Image: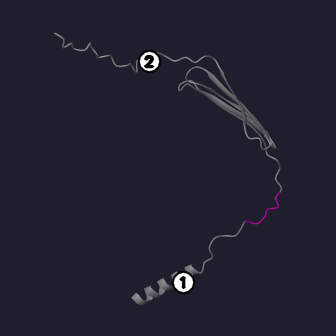
Amino acid sequence: MDFVLLLLAVVAVAAADKLPIGYGAPEDSSEEHEPAKYDFEWSVKDDESDNDFGHQESRDGDHTQGSYYAHLPDGRLQTVTYYVEGDSGYIADVKYDGEAHYPESDEYKPPKSQYGAPDSHES
């Protein structure tokens, strides 16, 4: 019985050693692809969680343009508009509307000074 198991193990190792390593390059594809063309838009407005943001984008071939917005916690509206022409990468313009408001916070207060006048040892 031990001899049979040993023989099977040797055969398995020998068979595994003969498997090809790696893979070949993918075959060339002759498929023609249409230039990318799409248009989408979505938004979220949830008063309970105070979320209000959205995104819009359209693409026709190498030209992409879009914008997204978010109402920030400080009260401002951030709007980003962008475009891509060919290999230019994203060109963005960021704008903020409104004025930032920060509520008063009792969360942090500097510690009270505990320094007193030094003791005088003069007589």
Left or right, residue 83 beside residue 100: right
Q: Which of the 4 quarters of the picture holds residue 2?
A: bottom left
The residue identified by callout 1 is 14
Choose mark 2 or mark 1, whichever is in front. Answer: 2
Image coordinates of residue 114 in percent, x first then y, are 29, 17
Dot 2 amino acid type: Ser
**Is residue 74 shown above or below 14?**
above
Q: Residue at x 58, y 19 (%)?
A: 75
| Residue 21 visible from this viewpoint | yes
Q: Which mark is residue 105?
A: 2
Image coordinates of residue 28 in percent, x first then y, are 78, 64
User: Element under label 2?
Assistant: loop
**Is residue 77 shown above or below 91?**
above
Please tell me which of labels 2 and 1 falls first in the chain. 1
Q: Which residues are magenta?
A: 26-31
Q: Which of the 4 quarters of the picture holds residue 18?
A: bottom right
| Residue 45 visible from this viewpoint | no
